[in-house]
Amino acid sequence: MPEERIEEFHLFAQDFNSLLGEMEDWQRQLQAKNAQLLRSSLHDPLTGLANRAAFRNALAELMQNEVDHQTSALLFLDGDNFKLINDNWGHAAGDKVLMEVASRLMTFAGKRHLAWRLGGDEFAVLLRECARKQKCRPCARR
């Protein structure tokens, strides 16, 4: 094979490898963006808690995996007269209250339990491994 054809082949191989590298970079960027989109689609932007869609997914998964026969308790929290905070002190104050509630729920939930913001001033908490009401009540009161 003539020298110039070999050189041409090497240049083509370099270009091809360069293009492959760029495509791998694009793929990594796309995967990162997809992960970011998935996270934002399942989390409340204000509080950082999982949202209603994540709640539905978690309940469906919990029902499917009921085989382990672990009893759980599901708590629903709805802020009474929350509208008054927004009406009297503004939405910024209401947002601060929601963020504080979310922060406390996240601290309470830790790694063992799950917490969601369902919308507005509605939240839910799943207490895992609550075999008896007596075991769940202290957690629910906190």
Image: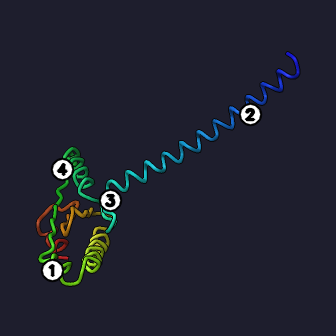
- Residue 115 image-quadrant placement: bottom left
Work out whether residue 49 or residue 72 is closer to the camera in this orientation and state it: 49
Report the quarter where the C terminus lies.
bottom left
Residue 84: assigned label: 1
**Amino acid under label 1?**
Leu
Secondary structure beneath dot 3 equals loop
The percent coordinates of residue 110 (x first, y second) are 32, 68
Residue drawn at the location 18% of the way across and 84% of the way down: 88
Residue 2: assigned label: none
Mark 3 lies on residue: 43
- Residue 42 image-quadrant placement: bottom left
Residue 69: assigned label: 4
Residue 14: assigned label: 2
- Residue 7 image-quadrant placement: top right
**Amino acid under label 3?**
His
Q: Mark 1 or mark 3, which is nearer the start of the sequence?
A: 3
The residues bearing labels 4 and 1 have C-alpha atoms spaced at a distance of 42 Å
Secondary structure beneath dot 2 equals helix
The residues bearing labels 1 and 2 have C-alpha atoms spaced at a distance of 67 Å
